Image (cartoon, helix red, strand yellow):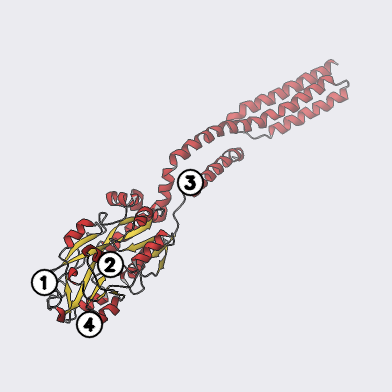
């Protein structure tokens, strides 16, 4: 057992070290933390980022949520490498973003809400393009609402009055108090200021008749109908079908984000966004087609096949370890074969060495016995030969090597007999 441990122990240690080096440097484990660029603390993006953080924490992944002004700042953080993942309003990707970033797909629809005051019905028509000569609360600079407002104004062309930099509840209040003529928001239907204006009789929701055309020009935009009475059947809100354009919020990631983290983000996205709402039916999202950033390879694989085979049966940590180990199993086996083949010859050499090392002593005693010129010297040599025989008898070797051990002992007896006969003849 000792000899086997001395041979196979270093071999096992070498294989283990090789495996550790391979797993650590060739196929490194995913980082267990990420930075998530969200939005303002009281906004929908921040609330969703917290849900992602809670879901990923179950897998041991720590998420740092970054408070931002919105989509434009989120793009800046991703491009600068200061965030790993972010919620991004669709339709705002720059050429730089398309080169540096990837998308995990569209996650939910964010309607572009257009509100005016009810008493302006005679002065304003029922479409965004009719608001060119009014003051619009169009979001703060750097926000997704502001970027969408400016983009739609460019699509319509013509001259527009300056956008008033108000957003959220401040914009809703300004509209109701008559400080602005219209207020626009890119937000979910559950946003407090949207609900406030939908339910206020002094405000009016107008639609966008070119929604279908806009969606054909940009995959990140989608037409959306707010159906008659869907907000409040009793009060008939809205009082008719309203055609809206919606930006599809997507989950953008750094191109170098570990595929395992992308996969676990997609699992979380399916859990968070697959339910329905008064705007979309269940299972509409996540959607791989509604994005203006390139879809990542991992996301494409996930939408096609779902979670990996191992991920269906193991936790995130174990599945990731086994997947990484599987990738390098064949190269490791190829490296292990010569090591394993080398072990048996080394083991045999170590066992036989324990036997053959005595032949040097035996040869020396034989020479001294033949060269002895007195009975006293021969007696000393014979005594040493007997001691050698005793020591060899204490050698422990595997049963399969006993024949070689007994060959040695018979050779010792043979030399002893030769020297004893020489002494008798002398």
Q: Which residue is mark 4?
A: 176
Q: Earlier in the sequence, mark 1 or mark 2?
A: 2
Q: Secondary structure at mark 3?
A: helix
Q: Nearer the viewer, residue 353 or 340?
A: 340
Q: Which residue is mark 2?
A: 150
Closer mark to the observer between disc 2 and disc 4: 2
**Inter-mark Cα distance, 4 to 1:** 22 Å
Q: In the image, 22: left or right of 135?
A: right
Closer mark to the observer between disc 1 and disc 3: 1
**Inter-mark Cα distance, 1 to 3:** 60 Å
Q: Which residue is mark 3?
A: 26
Closer mark to the observer between disc 3 and disc 4: 4
User: In the image, residue 209 lies at what x, y percent?
Assistant: 15, 65
Q: Earlier in the sequence, mark 1 or mark 3?
A: 3
User: In the image, residue 402 lies at what x, y percent?
Assistant: 61, 29
Task: Residue at 19% x, 69% y: name it.
Answer: 128
Q: Earlier in the sequence, mark 3 or mark 4?
A: 3
> Do the CB atoms of the residues marked 3 and 4 lie less than 8 Å apart?
no
**Inter-mark Cα distance, 3 to 4:** 61 Å
Q: Residues within 10 Å of mark 2 (few under 14, many from 20)?
A: some
Q: Secondary structure at mark 2?
A: helix
């Amino acid at each position: 057992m000792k000899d086997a441990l001395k041979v196979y122990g270093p071999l096992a240690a070498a294989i283990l070290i090789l495996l550790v080096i391979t797993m650590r440097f060739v196929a490194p484990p995913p980082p267990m933390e990420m930075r998530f660029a969200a939005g303002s603390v009281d906004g929908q993006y921040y609330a969703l980022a917290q849900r992602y953080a809670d879901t990923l924490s179950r897998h041991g992944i720590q998420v740092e949520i970054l408070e931002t002004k919105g989509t434009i700042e989120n793009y800046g953080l991703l491009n600068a490498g200061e965030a790993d993942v972010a919620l991004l309003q669709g339709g705002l990707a720059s050429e730089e973003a398309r080169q540096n970033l990837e998308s995990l797909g569209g996650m939910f629809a964010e309607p572009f809400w257009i509100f005016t005051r009810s008493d302006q019905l005679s002065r304003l028509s029922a479409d965004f393009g009719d608001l060119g000569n009014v003051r619009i609360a169009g979001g703060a600079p750097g926000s997704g609402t502001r970027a969408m407002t400016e983009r739609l104004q460019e699509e319509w062309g013509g001259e527009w009055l300056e956008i008033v930099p108000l957003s959220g509840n401040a914009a809703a209040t300004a509209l109701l108090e008559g400080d602005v003529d219209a207020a626009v928001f890119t937000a979910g239907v559950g946003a407090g200021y949207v609900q406030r204006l939908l339910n206020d009789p002094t405000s009016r929701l107008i639609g966008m008749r070119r929604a279908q055309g806009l969606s054909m020009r940009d995959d990140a935009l989608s037409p959306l109908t707010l159906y008659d009475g869907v907000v409040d059947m009793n009060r008939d809100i809205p009082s008719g079908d309203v055609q809206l354009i919606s930006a599809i919020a997507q989950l953008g990631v750094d191109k170098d984000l570990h595929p395992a983290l992308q996969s676990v983000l997609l699992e979380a996205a399916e859990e968070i966004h697959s339910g329905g709402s008064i705007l979309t039916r269940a299972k509409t999202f996540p959607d791989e087609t509604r994005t203006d950033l390139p879809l990542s390879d991992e996301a494409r694989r996930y939408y096609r096949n779902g979670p990996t085979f191992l991920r269906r049966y193991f936790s995130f940590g174990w599945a990731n370890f086994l997947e990484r180990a599987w990738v390098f199993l064949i190269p490791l086996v190829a490296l292990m074969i010569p090591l394993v083949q080398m072990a048996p010859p080394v083991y045999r050499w170590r066992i036989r060495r324990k036997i053959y090392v005595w032949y040097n002593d035996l040869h020396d005693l034989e020479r001294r016995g033949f060269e002895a010129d007195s009975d006293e010297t021969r007696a000393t040599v014979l005594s040493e030969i007997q001691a050698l025989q005793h020591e060899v008898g204490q050698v422990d070797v595997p049963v399969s090597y006993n024949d070689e051990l007994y060959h040695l002992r018979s050779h010792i007896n043979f030399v002893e007999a030769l020297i004893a006969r020489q002494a008798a003849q002398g």
